[in-house]
Amino acid sequence: MNLALIGYGKMGRLVEELALSRGHRVLFKIDIEGNEQGQALTAEHLNGVDVAVDFSIPDAVLRNVERITALGISMVVGTTGWWNQLEKARRLVEENHVGFVYGSNFSIGVNVFFQLMEAAATLIQQYPQYDPWIYEIHHRAKLDAPSGTALKLKQILEKGYGERAVSVASNRAGTVPGEHTVGFDSESDTLTFTHTARSRLGFASGALHAAEWIQGHKGFYEFSATLSR
């Protein structure tokens, strides 16, 4: 598989390392600098690319999607914080007949966590004395807060609770790769469920899995669709 890496920070470099170890090739890579208006995403630069993997910044995603899908290239977008533009991205993907995978979190463990919280919300909502809440912490350089993962957890809990509002608290400090805790509190006790990322390796591995998967698919998919359930 021939890849392009859009955003060549820590995540982009880790995806490259994993891709090369699996026998894939990286034909093009660009960081945010040098691609401020998407000007680097040309047919010449992306010639031969099968899938573009985007770990850039929220403000750049839709512009990147416009240029890359117009060239008939499928995409995996691991950038978060741009969900207000999802429908615009969906239209571009459908118009250009390519494949597209996005997600709040590309860790397989986190996606198992999502499924567990779906079950927990369905069960615990039967007991109104338990009040649900979410807390997340990430490294100080993460731009969006709450995280995309926390917002996905909020969506899951509110659906399970019949659209009841669920509080989310966020913190940005140090070098924490990511930790999310879901709690259910009552006067008598508290239930807590936590996912802790030890490194970015799980995110990069999931993104590469999505790139391998989308080669055989067209359409607009959330990352969970690439996993067997």
Image (cartoon, rainbow, N blue to C red):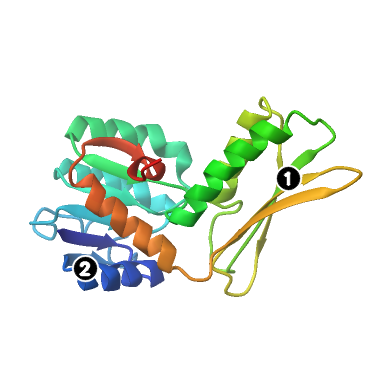
Residue sitting nearer the eye, 182 or 164? 182
Mark 1 to mark 2: distance in Å? 40 Å
Q: Earlier in the sequence, mark 1 or mark 2?
A: 2
Residue at 73% across, 31% down: 125
Residue at 45% across, 68% down: 200
Residue at 40% across, 37% down: 86
Where does residue 59 sit, x and y in percent of width and height? 42, 51
Mark 2 surroundings: few (<14), some (14-19) or many (≥20) residues within 10 A:
few
Q: Is 26 left or right of 104, judged from the image as shown? A: left
For residue 133, which numbered disc appears in the image?
1
For residue 117, which numbered disc appears in the image?
none
Where does residue 12 sit, x and y in percent of width and height? 33, 67
> In the structure shown, which secondary structural element does the residue marked by tag 1 occupy?
strand
Number of marks drawn:
2
Quick one: quadrant of the N terminus? Answer: bottom left
For residue 22, which numbered disc appears in the image?
2
Looking at the image, is 128 positioned above or below residue 109? above
Is residue 201 visible to the viewer in this orientation of the structure?
yes
> Of discs 1 and 2, which sits in the foreground?
2
